[in-house]
Amino acid sequence: METIEISTPSKSYPVFIGRNAATYMPDFIRENFSQVGKILIITDEKVANLHLHTVKELLSGTGIPVLEYVVPEGEHAKTFDVFYECQSYALSHNLNRKSMIVALGGGAVGDLAGFVAATFMRGIPFIQVPTTLLAHDSAVGGKVAINHPQGKNMIGVFYQPEAVFFDVSFLETLPPRELRSGFAEVVKEALIQDQEFYKWLLSNVSRLDSLSEVQLLHMIKRGIEIKAAIVSEDEKEAGVRAYLNLGHTLGHAIEGLAGYGKIAHGEAVMIGTIFALHLSMKKTRLDFNIEEFIHWAESLGYQTGIHEGFNNQDMLSFMKRDKKVTGDNVTFVLLEKVGSPKLENLSDNEIIENLSTMYTKRK
């Protein structure tokens, strides 16, 4: 098992990665949180059927009473109503400041459960137990939030977990769509930080449905290391942490306009990443083989252009609600070269002009 230490100004905590990593969780809780009186697992409908029994059995070894609350799958969990229901359940079952929440699931469950933990009685400890490849990114760094119809992750806080247990055996049940969603974040991490890692991905990943455990462990570990380095330098996105948003400005707009949950997060981010690469080649003179990248993405099952049902003006309006807007301009993460990102403000006209090329070339 691999261990990566995440160090931020507010907290340091371990990320445990490996097959059966979750089996170490009871000892970790006993050793570090002996005062905890109740544990609440928040998970979603699909994960509950696959892994809830296993995790409850593990946590029963702590001798602490374990409760569970099952929420809708995916982005449907990240609403005011579901957030309120989680809080109500915790209160009605007498959780208090000596209670703990375990987030068992993908990125959406982690975001929701972390926000519940951050706000219940002004904050109680929580542990992330990711069950998707996407969650290697979202479970680390302390961004927890719910969505608003006018924007993704608009209501939330920075609140770090006590630990992350990334058990790769949980990934064996992932459908292709979820693998694509998570792999897009791995690609993002490589593009912003590590040219050699990007080359490794390009050379070694030709199919997502036949990844070996060695490949998975390598990409998860390297992805988390990249995020850890950035988060330790900039916990609350005042500077370099914004680079982790490569592909997300347009990606979030696509998700929101399609209706949250209709397009997987990473699939939308991949389209946004291709858009950012196109922009980079124009704005920062990035030397990059975009056709090779698009061909590779398509061979892995990604859609690489914007669906013709979307409208340029609607896309622009949605992007202007983004947290990364500067004044009247939308801020994009671009690349000067692979491993060297920069922030660039674009005018409305530039965005519209370049969006149009995405519709016509990639449907």
Image (spheres, rainbow, N blue to C red):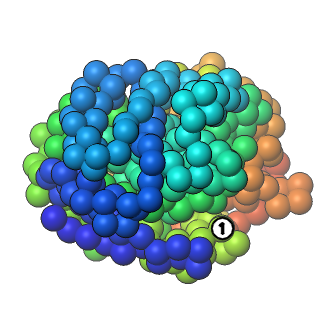
Residue 313 horizontal side relative to residue 252, left or right: right
Q: Quadrant of residue 112?
A: top right
Q: Reply above or below: 19 against 180.
A: below
* Depth order, front residue of 270/94: 94
Q: Reply above or below: 80 against 10.
A: above
Residue matched to label 1 = 237
Q: Quadrant of residue 33?
A: bottom left
Indicate the position of residue 269 as horizontal and vertical percent values. 51, 44
* Depth order, front residue of 242/203: 242
Count of numbered circles in the view: 1
Q: Amino acid at mark 1?
A: Glu
Indicate the position of residue 59 as horizontal and vertical percent values. 28, 44
Classify mark 1: helix, strand or loop: loop
Indicate the position of residue 92 as horizontal and vertical percent values. 60, 27
The reply to whether residue 227 is in sight is yes
Residue drawn at (79%, 55%), measured in percent from left and top? Answer: 325
The reply to whether residue 349 is in sight is no
Residue 19 horizontal side relative to residue 48, left or right: left
Residue drawn at (26%, 41%), measured in percent from left and top? Answer: 60
Quarter of the N terminus within the rendering: bottom left
Q: Quadrant of residue 39?
A: top left
Q: Residues within 10 Å of mark 1 (few under 14, many from 20)?
A: some
* Depth order, front residue of 175/124: 124
Residue drawn at (33%, 28%), measured in percent from left and top? Answer: 47
- Kindly give the residue lying farthest to the right in the view shown: 328
